[in-house]
Image (spheres, rainbow, N blue to C red):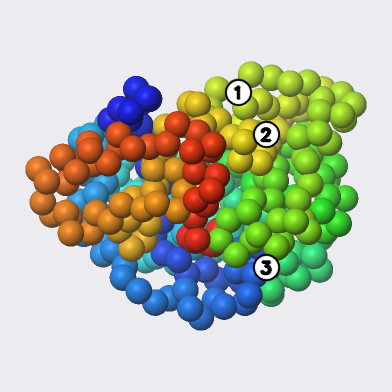
Amino acid sequence: MKDGFNRDIDYLNISLTNICDLNCTYCMPYNDVATYNKGRYLSVDDYKFIIKSMSELGIRKIEFTGGEPLLNPNLVDLIYYAKNYCNIEEVSLTTNGIKFSEQGLKLKNAGLDKVNIQINSLKEYKYESLTRGGNLGLVLKSFSTALNLGIETTIDTLIIKNFNDDEMDDFIQLANNFPITLRFFEMMYVGKLDGLFNEGYLNVADIINNMDNMTKIKSYDKVCRYYYKTPNSRGKIGIVSRFYDINCWSCDKITLSYDGKIRLCRYENKEYDIFNFINKPLTFSEVMKDIIKYKPKDFNEIKNNITYRNINEL
C-alpha cells in the first residue's frame, strides 16, 4: 500500500490485548489495571482475516504487541499462520519478558524472527518498584533464552530522570558484551503520562552524543535515526527520541488495536474502526486503500491530537 505521500506501508503493529501481567508506573500511572480488561476484543479468526488481507495489500512485516502479547493464548498460532500462509517475511514480538522463557522455543519454531524485551532497570529493587512487583530474574532468563535460540534480540529501555539514568552505562555494557540492539527511549507524553513526562523527561540523545568512544553509524531501519557503537562492541545502541526526532519522513507502519481500530500513526488520537469490515474481503481492501491515504506526513500534523491510549495499548 502507498499512502498519500507515496510511502510504501508494509509494516503492521498488531496489539493482541490491553492486559498485562505487570503494572508499570509509566504505563498505567494511576494503578487502574482492572479497567483494562473490558471492551471489545478481536477473535483469533478476526486476526487471521486481517493478517491475510493486509498481506494481500502489501504488508510484509508484523510486530505483535499488547498489553503483554504472551497473555494471548493464540500467539503461537498467529505467528505460524502469518509466516506460513500469508507471505509475511518478518515477525517480531514486543514483550515484558516475564513469560518469554517458557514459550521461547515454541515461538521460534512457529517462525518468530525478532523479540524486543522491555528492561528498564538492571537493579532488582528498582525493577520491582517500577513494575509494581515484577521479577527481574525471569526477564533476564528470557533475555538469555532469546540469545540461545538465535532470535534477533533488542532490549528496550525507557530512561527516566533521577530513576534509572544512572544505569545507562550498565545497559551499554550489555550491548558491548552481547550481539543485541539496545534502544534507549525518552519519556513520551501520551495517554495519562503528561504529568510524568514533565518529571521524568531526559534528553538521552545529548547524553549519548557527549559520551567518549561513541561512534555514530548508519541506521538501516526506520526506528532510530542513528545507531552508535563503542570500540569492540558486539551490539549497537539506538535512541528513540522525542516525537519531533522520530523518523516520520520514512515511516512505513500502521497499528491495529486489540479492539479492531487502525491508527495510521502510533501516537495519533484519530482511529479508524474496521471491525465491521472483517470477513468482507473486497470491502476491507477498498476501505484500507482509502484509509491509508490519510496517514500523516509527520508529527507536526498530530502534535495537538495525541492518543488518549496509555502505553500498554500502543
Q: Which residue is mark 3?
A: 25
Residue at x 62% of width, y 36% of height? 244
Task: Give how far across and how far down residue 27 sits, in percent.
Answer: 61, 63
Mark 2 is surrounded, within 10 Å at the Cα level, by few (under 14), some (14 to 19) or many (20 or more) other residues, namely: many
Residue at the bottom extreme, as displayed: 34
Q: Amino acid at mark 3?
A: Thr
**Marks 3 and 1 in Cβ contact (< 8 Å):** no
* 309 w.r.t. 271: above or below: below
Residue drawn at x 79%, y 47% is 202
What residue is pinned by disc 1?
219
Q: Position of residue 18 (x, y in %)?
A: 45, 66
In the picture, measured across the screen, residue 300 lies left or right of residue 215, that is left
Q: How far apart are labels 2 and 3 at the CA level?
A: 24 Å
Q: Secondary structure at mark 3?
A: loop
Q: Is residue 158 left or right of residue 263?
A: right
Q: Secondary structure at mark 1?
A: loop
Whole-angstrom CA distance, mark 2 to mark 1, is 9 Å
Pick whichever of labels 2 and 1 is earlier in the sequence.
Answer: 1
Q: Residues within 10 Å of mark 1 (few under 14, many from 20)?
A: few
Q: Position of residue 302 (x, y in %)?
A: 49, 43
Q: Are marks 2 and 3 in contact (CB under 8 Å)?
A: no
**Which mark identifies residue 238?**
2
